[in-house]
Image (tube, rainbow, N blue to C red):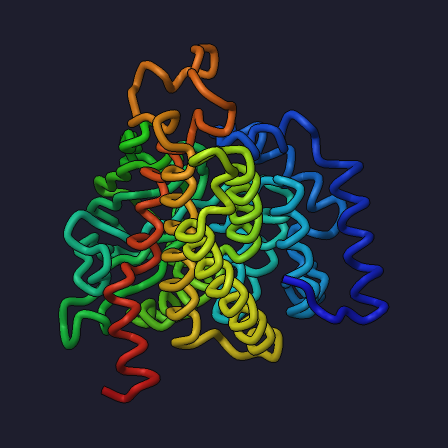
């Protein structure tokens, strides 16, 4: 999305472009462009290079080691990274836990954990969802019982993204069964190496190991690992989720996905002419592009409010819903554009060493389509987000 950038913003954009040209390894950008899974080493490499440049925590306040980017600077950075096929920053420590610690954590927690997030010494994962508590998160059952100077944690978390790489997990746990379900939840920071924690892989429909189950059996967690007050975790959880849902909008990635779709449509032929010239296809493409432009503008407004010290409200739910719909529409239209070459997923073809018939852009089209069905579920399902919008904005 083109904006009338100021001279300083143009200079910042040029700085980001120069950094990406100089520091983004070609083999890494090629992986992203081909929709291949990244290794932990890939993530760590990019994390370190961003931190060295001061770009990792651009949105953090300067007092915590950030650069205090404006909303437009954040937009520029994400747009340029998407255009260059740079890896997305793993959000759990940098974009999810860190804002909670900065707003509600103790001075000791801020001083200890925030530098370790920046250095990459700690890799965080998120312990929210449970088998019976996904979108209805307040019904979670993982318990934490205080015994002296420790909590004893028992229960199960699921859909824990990249938990196989993490050495830390932030968890919502039930510390009281009195009153409303939301009133008995606390926010704990837990070391994954603690005895009693087991991580079990979940293999997704596209055949990759991206998410996990995490089981807790009599896990001892020091009381000082409690964030804020006991039984006030629901407040912190909502604050974190508003930041997560804003990020889920993925404006930059949708913009690059749209450009990739246009390139495919210019190469694929239908009735003797490029598919992009087909009136029906062109109309569907235009509708997605219009929606994406509108969402990009809304995203800037929400991030600007966050820059002013306000936690994103129901607007982040709007971004989450619309962002997931747009990304899924792009994936779906890409798969349709590729046609027979985007053959259904077969596990034997997951290996990068095996031949895939058809053009290169067809190899992972169905895998991406299947994997991104999850976008409308994680971070709070779209149905739940529509309920939040109805209540908070429409007053119904």
Residue farthest to the front?
Answer: 272
Question: Residue 2's spot in the image, x, y percent?
Answer: 68, 64
Q: How many marks?
A: 0
Q: Quadrant of the C terminus?
A: bottom left
Tell me residue 212's x, y (percent). Answer: 30, 36
Q: Is residue 309 left or right of residue 317?
A: right
Query: In this rendering, does residue 208 appear at all?
Result: no
Q: Nearer the viewer, residue 165 or 245?
A: 245
- What residue sits 69% from the left and 28% below the top? 26
Image quadrant holding the N terminus, namely: bottom right
Q: Position of residue 36 (x, y in %)?
A: 49, 28
Q: Residue at x 41, y 55 (%)?
A: 284
Query: Where does the image place residue 104, in percent across and percent down from the top left?
Result: 48, 70
Residue 130 lies, with reference to residue 236, above or below; the image says: above
Q: Is residue 386 visible?
A: yes
The residue depicted at 24 percent of the width and 39 percent of the height is 215
In this view, 209 is above or below 258: above
Q: Is residue 50 left or right of residue 304?
A: right
């Amino acid at each position: 999305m083109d904006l009338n950038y100021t001279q300083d913003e143009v200079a910042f954009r040029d700085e980001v472009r120069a950094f990406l040209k100089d520091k983004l390894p070609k083999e890494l950008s090629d992986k992203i462009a081909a929709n291949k899974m990244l290794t932990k080493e890939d993530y760590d490499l990019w994390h370190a290079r961003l931190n060295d440049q001061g770009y990792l925590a651009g949105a953090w306040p300067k007092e915590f080691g950030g650069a205090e980017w404006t909303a437009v600077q954040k937009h520029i950075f994400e747009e340029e990274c998407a255009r260059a096929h740079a890896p997305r920053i793993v959000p759990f420590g940098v974009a999810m836990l860190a804002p909670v610690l900065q707003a509600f954590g103790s001075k000791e927690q801020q001083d200890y954990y925030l530098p370790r997030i920046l250095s990459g010494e700690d890799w965080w994962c998120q312990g929210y969802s449970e088998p019976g508590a996904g979108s209805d998160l307040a019904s979670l059952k993982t318990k934490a019982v205080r015994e002296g100077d420790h909590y004893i944690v028992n229960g199960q978390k699921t859909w824990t993204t990249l938990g196989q790489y993490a050495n830390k997990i932030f968890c919502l746990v039930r510390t009281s069964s009195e009153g409303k379900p939301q009133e008995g939840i606390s926010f704990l920071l837990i070391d994954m190496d603690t005895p009693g924690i087991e991580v079990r892989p979940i293999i997704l429909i596209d055949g990759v190991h991206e998410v996990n189950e995490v089981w807790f059996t009599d896990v001892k967690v020091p009381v000082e690992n409690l964030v804020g007050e006991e039984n006030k975790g629901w407040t912190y959880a909502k604050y974190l989720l508003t930041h997560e849902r804003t990020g889920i909008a993925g404006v930059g990635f949708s913009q690059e996905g749209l450009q990739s779709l246009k390139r495919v449509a210019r190469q694929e032929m239908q009735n003797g002419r490029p598919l992009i010239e087909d009136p029906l296809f062109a109309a569907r493409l235009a509708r997605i592009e219009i929606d994406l432009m509108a969402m990009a503008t809304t995203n800037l407004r929400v991030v600007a409010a966050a820059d002013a010290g306000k936690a994103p409200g129901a607007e982040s739910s709007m971004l989450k819903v619309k962002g997931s719909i747009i990304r899924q529409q792009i994936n779906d239209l890409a798969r349709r554009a590729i046609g027979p070459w985007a053959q259904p997923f077969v596990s034997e073809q997951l290996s990068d060493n095996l031949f895939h018939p058809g053009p290169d852009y067809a190899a992972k089209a169905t895998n991406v389509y299947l994997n991104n069905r999850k976008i409308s579920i994680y971070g709070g399902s779209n149905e739940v987000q529509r309920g939040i919008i109805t209540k908070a904005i429409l007053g119904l």
